[in-house]
Amino acid sequence: MTDRPAIPSGFSLRDRRGAWLAVISGERRGLVAAAERGGLAVLAALYRAGLAAHNLRLRLPGAVRRAPCPVVSVGNLTVGGTGKTPMVAHLACLATSLGLRPLIVSRGYGAAAGGGPNEEALELEALAPGVPHVQSPDRLGAIRRWTADHPCDLVILDDGFQHRRLARDLNMVLVDALHPFGLGPSDFGRLLPRGILREPLSALARADLAILTRAELVGAEDLTRIKKEVTLKTRPGTPILTASHRPTGLRMPDGSRREADWLRGQDVAAACGIGHPEAFRRTLEQQGAAVRLFETFPDHYAYTRADLDRLIEAARAADAKMLVTTGKDFVKWRPLIAGSPPPMDVAALEVTFQILEGEDVLRRRIAALVPLEADSGRT
């Protein structure tokens, strides 16, 4: 009997994403599930054909256009979270420390009606204060409009690995060390919708630099194995960096903070609506918290006060001392509890993105993008 990769514990079968993951991972069995996997395999073949046609179109003259300043792209190969938002913030702060004037550009998935910022924009505002951020499906147009009126030395393209119509000067791909290319060994190389790959693993050859995120959540042996797998798929000599998401504190609704060590030995409830909820749960447990209740919501979920009231009631029933969520979710929770404090502590786990191995390589690559003569004209 062969082992089937289990669906990550953070995913809930109550939402459509959880049900889909249960099917593609093999967690859901039986004739109906097998038929569903067969249908998804057919759709994946059509998706692969579409990718091939798109790649051919990109070879046409004028298909790839260049922005008026250097572009660094941050992206991944899988659906779900790999830590792109914290990495973008890290890059923005790094560029600023080098004396550059960066601009963050993203598509704006899940943005509020009327063009309001989405949760990633609000989180980036907190993680990289003062760095401008524009959101638009027309990312090249957004860059041109911004640079026409504002100084800019470097564009950081959020979730841009598949946005190949825009030329980039540094192409970075993030690989989640917890689930590098899918939910388990049987899903390696499986494209959407049969698997969670946006592109075949051969697309890693486009990367100028690869970063293994959440490296702190896997053992040294597993990390070495993943490095070897990524090295085989990237071009010879491509740097492979490692990074962690280090908890730094708990942010309360009133703006006060507690040290992350407060979690050690505490019974907590947790909830989130992110691409990779299992990583959030593991981070809490690694910090020493006893997670008595864990609720998940779809990515970009629009919370209501009724959602929070239900979560708080469930957390109290589980004898939790605090309800904890992610920074991305907290920006949507705070307005809901403003003026009406909940009957228990609610907090966001603050996490800092940290390059564990290869920070010097990253700094050199970023610094090399802006010509030296541009320095003399920067004010």
Image (tube, rainbow, N blue to C red):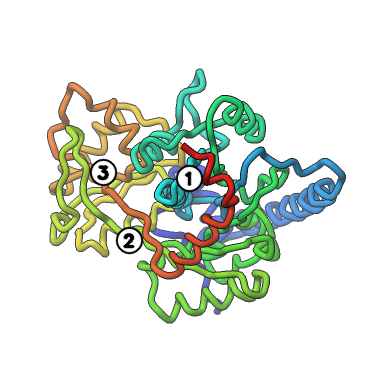
Whether residue 290 is visible here, answered yes or no, is yes
Q: Residue furthest right?
A: 60
Percent across and percent down for residue 169 are 64, 52
Check disc 2 and report its element: helix, strand or loop.
Answer: helix
Left or right of residue 185, residue 322 in this image: left
In the picture, residue 271 is in which quadrant?
A: top left
**N-term mark: 2 or 1:** 1
Q: Nearer the viewer, residue 101 or 372?
A: 372
Q: Name the kind of residue labelled 3 in the image.
A: Ala
Tell me the residue at 50%/39% (across/down).
378
Check residue 348 in the rendering and tell me which mark sits there, or answer none.
Answer: 3
**Above or below, comparing residue 240 to residue 327 in the picture:** below
Left or right of residue 221, residue 46 in this image: right
Q: CA distance from mark 2 to mark 1?
A: 36 Å
Q: Name the kind of residue labelled 2 in the image.
A: Arg
**N-term mark: 1 or 3:** 1
Left or right of residue 241, residue 123 in this image: left
Whether residue 26 is visible here, answered yes or no, is no
Percent across and percent down for residue 267 are 15, 54
* Residue to which mark 1 is pinned: 100
